[in-house]
Image: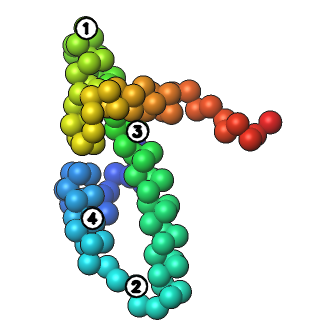
Amino acid sequence: MDASHSQTPLGAGSPASVVAAFREWLAGADAVDDGDRISLVTELERLKGAAAAAQARATDALRVSQEAVRPQDAARSVGSQVALARRESPTLGDRFVGLSRALVHERCPPPWLP
């Protein structure tokens, strides 16, 4: 992480506790007028993308960490842990671990770019 990410928003705490606090705050956030509602929808879309990227980076960091400690068990263990955290099947957890690895390390250009 670079220096701009060393301070957590919304006060001190772990990244997970900051996200939980933001999620609770967001549940009660209402826009004032239609312009604010459109702006909120726009920012929530950006937030979804940032959250998906952060989830992929965290998943891959977990995989790397577990492979260093228990290389023989890492593939199955990480997929199961991720599935539990994402509240989905172990098969989908394994799939997300693989996708996260590809997204973090391969950085393929989108198919529409030459």
| Residue 23 image label | 4
Q: Which residue is mark 2?
A: 31
Mark 3 vs 2, N-terminal side = 2
Q: Are marks 1 and 4 in contact (CB under 8 Å)?
A: no
Residue 70 in the image: state x and y as whole percent: 22, 13
Please state, as top left, top right, bottom left or bottom right, where the C terminus lies in the image. Answer: top right
Q: Amino acid at mark 2?
A: Ala
Q: CA distance from mark 3 to mark 2?
A: 30 Å
The quarter holding residue 107 reads top right
Q: Secondary structure at mark 3?
A: helix
User: Helix or strand or loop: what does disc 1 sit on?
Assistant: loop
Q: Position of residue 71 (x, y in %)?
A: 27, 11
Estimate the spatial distance between the alpha carbons at disc 4 and disc 2, rounded to whole Å. Answer: 16 Å
Which residue sits at x=46%, y=75%?
40
User: Can residue 61 be seen in the rendering of this structure?
Assistant: no
Disc 4 + disc 2, Cβ < 8 Å: no
